[in-house]
């Protein structure tokens, strides 16, 4: 059962339910064998010594029966469990009674009253929620469309302005809201509320799976109908997990005949319908499980052979398009498949296109166009209703906010009156104290003491003034020293670069002047000199960049550039041939294969930041991976890069310290601690930011974000 379906789908669904629902408790046991087992168990009932023995035997008969046969057995089990004081069995069988009679108001009211008299427990709360959800289903199907609309507004008002604090009550309200909301729309608004209900059900941690199974069984078809296949698969997997949980729960109670083959079959079949989001192994696994169920259960075998939905999904998933065309043509006009006609036509069109069947392709395209037009009209109507609902909800929130504001202002006025009265009372009391003090015999001593205190305060005030003036002088001296230091560094940096370049060139010249057979030894030393020259030059360039950035002397040169070009520049600058030199260290760039874009930005400065981040990652990662990725949100105008490694990580509390000048986590590592400081200055110049992702575990992750106009 789903939340709601368009009216023209009802007959098709009813035909489907006639096929699959009566056999929900069927097993691989044939009718004759099952009857023999039931008779055998009935004969042993007379020998039962305790209520628990009788309950166990009655449960076995209950699980072997279905439909109307189960009602008297359930009531008999409940009577024995209630007499024996077994609350667990009472709650379980009351859920069964409610589920069997979910369209009977009086029975649901009876179950609700019985639950109200039981001692509080998590399973009781779960059972109350389950019964309340069944009552919601019953009321929903019994009411007129106008009454359904009124109830929806009531639920929206309740949830928007005054949601229940109790988690179970909030889940019950959300379920009712989703149920009635499905009358108005089946679009994103309904999916959003289903997501909220799903999250809430996960948070509640229900002791038994009945509520979860009900929620997931109704949610999965909604996502499937909206072609939101990832969420549909997620709901079906959660549904299977809930079914497994119930099976384990009942197996622990010794109920060997309890199972749910039809629920599993419907899940697997619906999951096959999302074959575009499944791997080939998953497709084979689900279809294999369907065939196993069909061998054991005649009603499932009938559905598989006569309705063939699982077969057509499997044929499409395995690219057997010729077989798929045959099956779809046989089933296309079957009213049972009316809810899925649009999907069937899409599959038929694709299969015809793949096989070159132009006649079928033309027919499928015409019919698909008609179905898409109908869906467009339905979707347009739903969006209109959805917008009206959103408008109503916005008005409700505004009314609630106005009420809260007025209430808050009233509280402020009340507090103001109380404070004013308090101040007046305090003033009166202070006046009385002063009058009494004047009459005190120790008035002179008090005056002298106050004079001494005032003198001390004056001295402290004068001392504080002198200290403040001294601090001002020290501050000015520090600023002057910092300015002189910066000027000195700038001058020295420019003076150092020229001789360094000469050292590197002349060392190579000396090595080149020696005959080739004898210059290997000198070449080694020349390489060492060039390496150290590059290190010192990098330090000098870093110092010059810092001076320019701190004094506003650095300007940006924006021009159109591809994001991939910036990334490749950074990678090639850090890693020779684009790969790390360290054994066991691997660079992963753009793991999800994002699309490249052209952006207007200073690519050289962005690359400079990325080079610093990549060098840091390589420096502190001996083995593992360095993941270099980017993301561009054109709508928001935001470009972000991330560099994540599996290295030593950053100690907690040091996330901002490492961006200071000459700060290193490991003083034994090469470098002088300027790279991250320069990176943050450059990011700030570009009105962006570079930060440490504190949520990342297993290493360090730096994120650079830059706005793009």
Image (cartoon, grey):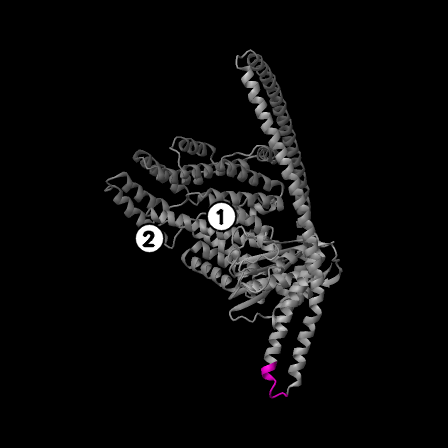
Residue 66 sits in which quadrant?
top left
Magenta stretch prevailing secondary structure: loop
Of residues 636 and 678, the one drawn nearer to the viewer in this rendering: 678
**Label 2 CA crowd tier, 10 Å (few <14, some 14–19, many 20+):** few
Q: Is residue 63 visible?
A: yes
Q: Residue at x 64, y 29 (%)?
A: 405
Name the spot of residue 248 as percent of width and height, x first: 38, 50
Residue 147 sits in which quadrant?
top right
Taking the magenta stretch, the answer to whether it contains residue 368 is no
Q: Residue at x 44, y 36 (%)?
A: 128
Question: Exactly how many numbered labels are in the figure?
Answer: 2
Q: Secondary structure at mark 1?
A: helix
Q: Which mark is residue 547?
A: none
| Residue named by callout 1 | 18
Of residues 388 and 69, the one drawn nearer to the viewer in this rendering: 388
Q: Residue at x 48, y 61 (%)?
A: 287
Query: Does 534 appear above or below 257?
Result: below
Q: Is residue 357 visible?
A: no
Query: Does 82 appear above or below 542?
Result: above
Q: Secondary structure at mark 2?
A: helix
Of residues 150 and 67, the one drawn nearer to the viewer in this rendering: 150
Q: What separation in Å lies between label 1 and label 2 (alpha carbons)?
A: 24 Å
Query: Does 113 appear above or below 309?
Result: above
Q: Which residues are magenta?
A: 515-522
**Label 1 CA crowd tier, 10 Å (few <14, some 14–19, many 20+):** few
Q: Which mark is residue 33?
A: 2
In the displayed structure image, the side of residue 284 where residue 189 appears, left or right: right
Name the spot of residue 692 as percent of width and height, x first: 58, 54
In primary-sequence order, the first of circles 1 and 2 is 1
Name the spot of residue 694 as percent of width and height, x first: 55, 52
Name the spot of residue 296 as percent of width and height, x first: 40, 57
């Amino acid at each position: 059962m789903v939340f709601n379906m368009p009216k023209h789908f009802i007959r098709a669904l009813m035909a489907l339910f006639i096929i699959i629902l009566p056999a929900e408790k069927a097993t691989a046991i044939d009718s004759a064998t099952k009857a023999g087992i039931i008779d055998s168990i009935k004969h042993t009932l007379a020998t039962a010594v305790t209520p628990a023995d009788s309950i166990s035997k009655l449960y076995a008969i209950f699980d072997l029966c279905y439909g109307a046969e189960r009602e008297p057995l359930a009531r008999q089990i409940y009577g024995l469990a209630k007499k024996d004081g077994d609350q667990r069995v009472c709650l379980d069988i009351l859920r069964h009674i409610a589920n069997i009679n979910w369209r009977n108001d009086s029975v649901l009211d009876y179950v609700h009253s019985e639950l109200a008299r039981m001692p509080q427990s998590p399973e009781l709360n779960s059972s109350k929620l389950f019964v309340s959800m069944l009552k919601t289903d019953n009321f929903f199907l019994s009411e007129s469309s106008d009454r359904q609309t009124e109830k929806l507004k009531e639920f929206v008002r309740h949830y928007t302005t005054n949601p229940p604090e109790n988690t179970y009550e909030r889940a019950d309200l959300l379920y009712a809201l989703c149920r009635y909301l499905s009358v108005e729309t089946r679009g994103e608004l309904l999916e959003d509320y289903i997501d909220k209900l799903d999250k809430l059900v996960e948070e509640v941690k229900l002791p038994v799976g009945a509520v979860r199974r009900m929620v997931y069984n109704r949610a999965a078809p909604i996502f499937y109908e909206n072609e939101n296949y990832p969420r549909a698969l997620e709901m079906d997997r959660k549904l299977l997990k809930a079914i497994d949980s119930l099976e384990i729960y009942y197996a622990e109670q010794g109920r060997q005949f309890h199972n749910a083959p039809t629920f599993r079959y419907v899940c697997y079949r619906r999951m096959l319908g999302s074959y575009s989001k499944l791997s080939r192994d998953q497709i084979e696994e689900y279809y294999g499980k369907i065939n196993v169920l069909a061998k054991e259960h005649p009603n499932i075998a009938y559905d598989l052979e006569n309705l063939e939905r699982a077969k057509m999904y499997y044929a499409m998933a395995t690219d057997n398009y010729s077989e798929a065309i045959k099956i779809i043509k046989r089933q296309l006009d079957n009213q049972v498949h009316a809810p899925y006609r649009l999907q069937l036509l899409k599959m038929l069109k694709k299969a015809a296109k793949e096989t070159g069947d132009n006649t079928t392709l033309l027919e499928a395209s015409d019919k698909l166009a008609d179905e898409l037009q109908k869906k467009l009209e339905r979707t347009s109507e739903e969006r209109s209703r959805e917008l009206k609902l959103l408008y109503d909800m916005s008005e409700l929130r505004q009314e609630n906010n106005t009420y809260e504001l007025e209430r808050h202002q009233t509280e402020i006025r009340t507090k103001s009156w109380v404070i004013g009265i308090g101040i007046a009372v305090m003033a009166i009391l202070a006046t009385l104290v002063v009058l009494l003090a004047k009459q005190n015999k120790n008035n002179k001593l008090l005056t002298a003491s106050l004079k001494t205190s005032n003198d001390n305060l004056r001295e402290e005030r004068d001392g504080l003034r002198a200290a403040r003036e001294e601090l001002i002088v020290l501050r000015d001296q520090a600023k002057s020293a910092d300015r002189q230091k910066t000027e000195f560094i700038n001058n020295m940096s420019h003076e150092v670069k020229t001789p360094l370049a000469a050292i590197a060139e002349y060392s190579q010249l000396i090595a080149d002047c020696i005959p080739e057979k004898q210059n290997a030894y000198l070449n080694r030393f020349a390489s060492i000199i060039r390496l150290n020259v590059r290190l010192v030059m990098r330090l000098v360039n870093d110092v010059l960049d810092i001076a320019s950035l701190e004094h506003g002397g650095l300007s940006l040169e924006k021009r159109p550039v591809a994001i991939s070009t910036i990334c490749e520049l950074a990678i090639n600058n850090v890693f020779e041939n684009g790969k790390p030199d360290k054994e066991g260290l691997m660079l992963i760039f753009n793991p999800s294969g994002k699309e490249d874009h052209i952006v207007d930005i200073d690519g050289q400065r962005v690359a400079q930041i990325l080079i610093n981040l990549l060098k840091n990652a390589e420096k502190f990662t001996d083995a593992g991976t360095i993941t270099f990725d980017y993301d561009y949100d054109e709508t928001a105008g935001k470009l972000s890069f991330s560099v994540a490694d599996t290295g030593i990580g950053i100690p907690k509390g040091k996330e901002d310290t490492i961006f200071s000048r000459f700060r290193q986590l490991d003083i034994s590592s090469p470098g002088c601690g300027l790279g991250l400081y320069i990176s943050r200055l450059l990011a700030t110049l570009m009105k962006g930011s570079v930060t440490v992702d504190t949520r990342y575990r297993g290493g360090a992750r730096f994120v650079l974000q830059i706005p793009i106009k």
